[in-house]
Image (cartoon, grey):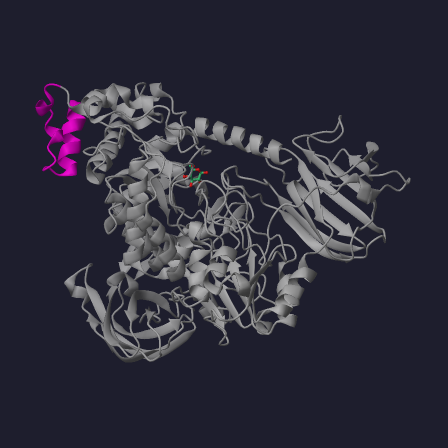
Amino acid sequence: MTTHHTARRRAAAAALCAAAALTPCAGAHAAPPPSETSAGTRPGEHAQPWRDATRSPAWRADALLRAMTMDEKVTLILATNDEDFDPLAHLGIPQMRRVDASGGLRGDTGVTAFPAPNALGATFDTALAERYGQAVGAEARAKGWNVVLGPTLDVDRNGLSGRAAEGYGEDTLVNGEMGAAVARGLESNDVIAMLKHFTVYNQESGPRETLAVDVSERALREVHYPAFEKAIREGGADSVMCAYPKVNGEFVCQNEELLADLKQDLGLEGYVATDFNPRTDPVAGINAGVDSQSLFPGTPREAFFDGRIPQERTEDAARRVLVALFDSGAYDNPLPTAIPDVVTTDEHQRLARETGAAASVLLKNSGALPLSKRDSVAVIGPAGSDAITGIEGSSYVDPGDFTTLAEAVREKAGAELTTVSQGSLGDVALPTVPASAFTAPGGEQGLQAEFFANPDFQGAPVATTTTPNVDFSGAAPVGGLPAQWSARFSGTITPTATGLARFSSLLSGSAKVTVGGETVFDGSRFIWDFFFAPQEYTLGGTVPLTAGEPVPITVEYSTREAGFFGPRLTLGWQPESLIPAAVEAAKEAETAVVVVNELTGEAVDRLGLRLPGDQDALIEAVAAVNPRTIVVLNTPGPVLMPWLDDVEGVVQSWYQGEAVGTATADVLYGDAEPGGRLPVTFPAAEGQGPTHDTGASVEYDEGIHVGYKWYDQQDEEPLFAFGHGLSYTTFEHRDLRAGSLDTRKGEHETASVRVRVRNTGQRAGSDVVQVYVGHLPTDAVDTPEKTLAGFAKVALRPGEKRDVRVELDRRALSYWDEDADRWVTPTGEVPVYVGRSAADVDLVGSMTVK
Ligand code: BGC
């Protein structure tokens, strides 16, 4: 299966790359980009005034546009592949070579796999974010890319979203500040940063290409737009990718109103490009404001000449691409001719490790952390090369060889004091259940399979057979079925071991599996894999079984919700639990570190917040025998923690790229502090939070109350609040002094908040000063109880104190008036809070807005 799978993945990835004209694929560098000479030092170039880099990007774009033929302008708008740019080389226009790069370069090797973007969000450190952007941008340029598809600024409104880890969390300001810093860093390398995905792309189900979102104008303006505006105005991002969904009835990439907002109100002077394979009409898209079809060909060239696309639109679109090329520096700085195999550097690897520690959130610590290097430790769980380093899908970065957590702990504590026990395989697909485990009702090996000519098991089966196991992909296991069908597999399963048996499935469609009368899992999946990462999306569960004692098994499969990959169900199992051996290892050690994980990524949303497979059971079993159990969550975000009271410490370590082992070990042993704070709220129960709806059409009925604002509004208590994160030292906040805001001084006026921060503990550490504002002084609209209005990260030595000043934008004190179609800043007193999280305020003051 592995070989077949790898071959399929490669073929599929190649097909995707070819179709997308995205070259971040293996072997993509066959044709190197043109040299400086071929790109433009032609005789007579001085006659090309737009080459004068002392002129403004707008001036240069106008000058070049005047010199271009209509044909050349259209070529620029339509160019997707390297060679499409050839006719433009005499103008000095370089190939625009695009790479996905949210946490490093996707598809290349010899690069740095940085911690995922939401981990970066957890650092609350904009200076670090800028360095991260600089490093990714430098590697992109070195590998021959000058358009970087990132950063992602999708506000995480739904914790179940498969791509939640690709943005910077649930808060608008954090997304804006981090996005602006990353974009600035990227563009410092003369590459174009493409912000994505504008706008309200917050889930994969729908599916995403046809998802219909209804959202209020106010929520767009206050929650979903601002990060784009900040990254454009303050980060200098030169392009924006429009998102797949339909917003208020029209696809974003075809939505004149939204694209006009982006250009007129959010300040985009560069260009808009569609995502890969959108469902829009490309001509309508260009007319609505798409400026470049860059990722996906298909716009008919004639449409620019037969009147379907007005000439002014063509001029404007081409001009916007030129502005981006000049403004970013991509025009002036040719791509390298020789592409090195390795572009990662020691400095970038140190940065990944530093980011990983700065992102790690110490959720709970009863005192066992940091660990002592003199204590014995059992490292349990997927803490080896089976760690999850990145998000599945288009932002996956190959980490190459990396130091695992087991190795990193062994380096700290020494080989004699470290034992490693697998405990759980983590979130992986398990080996297919063999025919020898099944007995059909007639006594043969295998299962009885009844097939129905409808997706709902209705009527009599149209075919009945015995199958060795449940393992089909792409087509039905029997011929003659209609496109929509269902099947019931039944018989008994005879366990080969006693204990907690684990089942998993790779599924496209819907499946319900019951074993011994217990439902092991029941759910739907549209796809089981998104090609680019080594892992696959599984669905599964556990059930206790006894060796040699057959129990009934039923597998009900329906093509309902199967996607375009067609029906698939592979039922896998792990008959023998690894937990008992891990429990023995935990008994022998002074400390048990249990690592658990969950894979998420593109095309699939999470079905719930429970840890997959047997991982909760593993933690419970280990904690029952080792009073110093520390849990490391190698997860994209919130999970339920039924074992929380039984463990001593919990570290949220996200997906940390190649630093997954080193950074976490640094934090566990106190060689680095856990610098992170939660950029998302962790719900206390399944279904808690503003939304858990991932249907095909979604109402954003939480309005502006996304994330912690919803918890305040509903008076609900989460498991861990937004902004929460403990330190190995302690901080004191005092002397809150809030300035005032004078609205007469204009839109760009800011108000300052000062607070004295002191490190009152014994260790160096950094505090994240979180400044929230309360309800605005107006009855006209409902405003949040708390809105993060500014933050600052300050590193302090023991005993050191500092006066920290945080500037609040006027926007933080304003709301969007839907009737007047403008921002309103109500005057009066506004509460100001300094907190350790959105739920833990320790200073209260107020600010006058006049
Ligand atoms: C994703 C984008 C990505 C593009 C190109 C799409 O599936 O939504 O984020 O940039 O593919 O790989």
**Closer-to-camera residue (196/256):** 196
In the picture, residue 670 is in which quadrant?
Answer: bottom left
Residue 555 percent across, percent down from the top left: 76, 45
- Location of residue 521 in the rendering, given as x and y in whole percent from the top left corner: 69, 51
Residue 312 vs residue 303: left or right? left
State whether residue 155 appears in this view.
Answer: no
Q: Quadrant of ligand 1?
A: top left
**Number of numbered discs present?**
0
At x 29% / y 72%, what residue is drawn?
A: 796
Residue at 44% x, 26% y: name it: 18
- Tell me if residue 271 is in the magenta stretch: no
Q: Check the image and report above or below for 758 versus 52.
A: below
Q: How far from the left and from the top, in percent, is residue 605?
A: 55, 48
> Residue 165 location, x and y as percent?
45, 52
Q: Main secondary structure of the magenta part?
A: helix
State whether residue 732 is above or below residue 812: below
Left/right placement of residue 566 relative to residue 308 reads right
Closest to the observer, 652 or 199 = 652
Q: Is residue 441 visible?
A: yes
Quadrant the N terminus occupies: top right
Residue furthest front as drawn = 416
Question: Is residue 547 shown left or right of residue 707?
Answer: right
Q: Which residues are magenta?
A: 43-68
Measured along the vertical axis of the image, is residue 189 above or below residue 793?
Answer: above
